[in-house]
């Protein structure tokens, strides 16, 4: 099986026996639980500047993967105006209380935390009811208070707190990044998204967030080969950020969004699902293996994605 695995060529030199061995080692690593680098809770904001590049998709899927790897995860939907993390997770009908009610003293924090039934160590916290604007007075201080309250829960502190950031660089962005000590910048390989990602990276650094990694989403290897799309290496050179994951364009992402069923839970796994799983693994261990583009094997040989280390 491993011999037939096809490795995306953009980030690796031409394959040789040594590389193949590394690939197999990296795949075998998946039989163990990743070792957490850093001490919990790791508060990670998922941001991008530009909208529609895949922040919520990344938050939902990486969060679900981390929960499946047995880490305690709380995902906070800080995209107050255009809340949709609950939809991607299929939890929209279970949001009775939100952080605003907690802050107003109308309910307890655990009442506002929605526990996923598939992976009970995954919980979602929404800031506000849908179609509400950012509540007056809700800002970085309030979000930091909520994160501190999550750390002090009697059930124990979460391993990861993921914050899904709104698009743009205004008040909502500032609020979302305030409690974070790490960031994932999501970008697509196009010039508008890259410029925004670069701007956001500068703002994160100004805010004292030094641990910034990037996810390159919606990559199409066919377009890269025809030089119609920037390669991941080009993106990396432009942004100068360590690579957490390379997610291919995959129609299954859209299907899973519409069904409220995170892609990483789908069986058999899909290309983008595997890439997101790889990104989650790398987030836990910081850099256990190289992130490479997972590609479909040539048609006749059937499905076979994979990546190396
Ligand atoms: P953001 O949170 O940055 O606004 P979303 O995660 O909501 O972006 O994604 C925007 C849209 O792009 C969604 O419809 C989603 O299904 C689609 N999408 C995201 N990533 C991919 C991908 N790798 N392949 C195909 N569609 C994608
Ligand atoms: Mg979003």
Image (cartoon, helix red, strand yellow):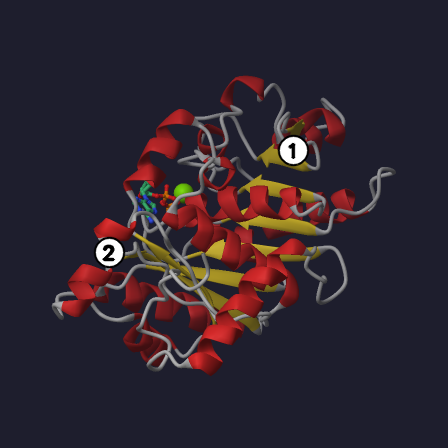
The image's mark for residue 119 is 1
- Say which of marks 2 and 1 sits in front: 2
Q: Earlier in the sequence, mark 2 or mark 1?
A: 1
Question: Can residue 138 be seen in the rendering of this structure?
Answer: no
Residue at 33 percent of width and 51 percent of height: 53
Crowd rating for badge 1 (residues with CA inside 10 Å; few <14, some 14–19, many 20+): some
Q: Are marks 2 and 1 in contact (CB under 8 Å)?
A: no
Q: CA distance from mark 2 to mark 1?
A: 35 Å
Q: Is residue 65 above or below residue 232?
A: above
Q: Is 69 above or below relative to 211?
A: above
Residue carrying label 2: 298
Secondary element at tag 2: loop
**Percent of width and height locating residue 62:** 53, 49
- Residue 130 in view of the camera: yes
* Left or right, 29 with reference to 10: right
Image quarter for ligand 1 equals: top left
Residue at the image position 44 percent from the left and 38 percent from the top:
268
């Amino acid at each position: 099986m491993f011999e037939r695995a096809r490795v995306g060529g953009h980030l690796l030199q031409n394959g040789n026996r040594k590389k193949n061995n590394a690939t197999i080692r990296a795949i075998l690593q998946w039989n163990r639980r990743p070792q957490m680098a850093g001490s919990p809770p790791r508060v990670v904001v998922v941001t991008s500047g530009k909208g529609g590049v895949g922040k919520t998709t990344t938050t939902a899927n990486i969060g679900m993967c981390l929960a499946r790897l047995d880490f305690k995860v709380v995902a906070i939907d800080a995209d107050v105006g255009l809340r949709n993390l609950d939809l991607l997770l299929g939890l929209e009908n279970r949001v009775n209380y939100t952080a605003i009610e907690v802050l107003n003293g109308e309910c307890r924090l655990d009442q506002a935390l929605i526990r996923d039934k598939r992976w009970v160590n995954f919980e979602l916290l929404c800031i506000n009811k849908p179609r509400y604007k950012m509540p007056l007075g809700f800002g970085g201080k309030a979000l930091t208070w909520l994160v501190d309250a999550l750390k002090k829960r009697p059930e124990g502190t979460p391993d990861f707190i993921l914050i899904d950031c709104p698009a743009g660089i205004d008040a909502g962005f500032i609020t979302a990044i305030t409690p974070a000590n790490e960031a994932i910048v999501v970008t697509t390989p196009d010039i508008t998204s890259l410029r925004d990602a670069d701007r956001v990276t500068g703002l994160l650094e100004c805010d004292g967030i030094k641990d910034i990694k990037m996810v390159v989403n919606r990559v199409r290897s066919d377009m890269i080969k025809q030089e119609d799309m920037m390669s991941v290496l080009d993106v990396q050179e432009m942004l100068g950020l360590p690579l957490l994951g390379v997610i291919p364009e995959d129609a299954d992402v859209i299907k899973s969004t519409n069904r409220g069923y995170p892609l990483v839970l789908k069986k058999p796994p899909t290309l983008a699902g595997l890439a997101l799983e790889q990104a989650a693994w790398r987030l836990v261990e910081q850099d256990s293996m190289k992130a490479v583009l997972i590609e479909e094997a040539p048609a006749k040989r059937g499905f076979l994605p994979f990546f190396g280390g």
